[in-house]
Image (cartoon, helix red, strand yellow):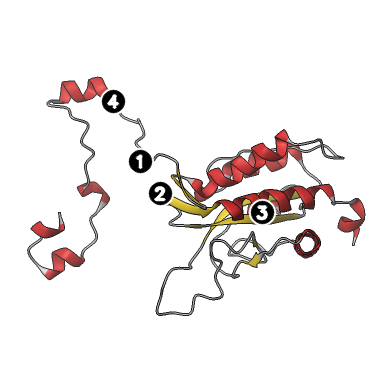
Amino acid sequence: PVHLLQTVGERASVVKADSMRIDIGAGSKDEGQGKMKPGDRATFLTPYQEWGELAVGKALDNRAGCAILVELLRGSRYPFDLYAAFTVQEEVGMAGARVASFAVAPDVALVLECTPAYDLPNENDVSPNVALGRGPSVYVMDSRTIQDPRLVSHIMRTADAQGIPFQIRQPGGGGTNTGMIQRAGGGMPAATLAVPGRYLHAPAAIISLTDYARVRQLADAVLRSLSRDLLAR
């Protein structure tokens, strides 16, 4: 506990992972082995809550994208074959996206994501970053890929036509499964559409329910207005 630390150095130092413990209530090694075994995983027990217009929960990056994809699948059929991939290990090499992109070999891919929102009070100018409540986040470039410009333009035109406000995610760091999908096979057109979220990769993240609904609406409209002519340009 911070109040038991004696020096300024102790208070400023970061606690190392091998100094942390998870108390499972075991009184002995034998009792502990009866409760869990090597290789078992631990996670935070964070209940999903709604605070007015905001949703709070764990792993919204990328449960938000998965939930939107489920809603799209529950809607009316698309005028083409739609393959939905709920992939794993995006943060550690994008293995799931690699397997899915080679297995399906799609003509085009739309990645649904949750992207960091840096919209809290800060001494720095945070205006170039996305914020909660201002609509879907459209990727242009990140550390892994330059988004397909045809798809980016199509997404923005569709948003304007539907009256959906959107934000351009600041180019630079981070990355999504688009970086792997775009390079699969002989190359595939791909783009990313994201829900802005605060405190991603923490025990509890926050998103705007309005942003979530708008990403779902925009993703649906983008897919329904896709054409081979668009990709032939």
The residue closer to the viewer here, 181 or 114, is 114
Q: Earlier in the sequence, mark 4 or mark 3?
A: 4
Q: Earlier in the sequence, mark 1 or mark 4?
A: 4
- Answer whether labels 4 and 3 touch (C-beta < 8 Å): no
Q: Which residue is mark 1?
A: 44
- Say what secondary structure mark 4 lies in: loop
Can see residue 114?
yes
Is 159 on the left or on the right of 56, as rendered?
right
Marks 1/2 in contact by CB < 8 Å: the verdict is yes
Residue at position x 47%, y 53% in the image: 206
- Whole-Å distance between the Cαs marked 2 and 4? 25 Å
Closer mark to the observer between disc 1 and disc 4 = 1
Q: Which mark is residue 36?
A: 4
Q: Earlier in the sequence, mark 2 or mark 4?
A: 4
- Calculate the distance from the C-alpha at mark 1 to the C-alpha at mark 4: 16 Å
Indicate the position of residue 49 as horizontal and vertical percent values: 44, 43
Residue at image coords 23%, 39%: 22
Question: Which residue is identified by label 2?
Answer: 204
Mark 2, residues whose alpha carbon is within 10 Å: few (<14), some, or many (≥20)? some
Q: Which mark is residue 214?
A: 3
Mark 1 residue type? Phe
Q: Nearer the viewer, mark 4 or mark 3?
A: 3
* Coordinates of residue 42 in the picture (x, y in percent): 34, 36
Task: Determine crowd level at label 3: few under 14, some 14-19, many 20+ residues with C-alpha closer than 10 A.
Answer: many
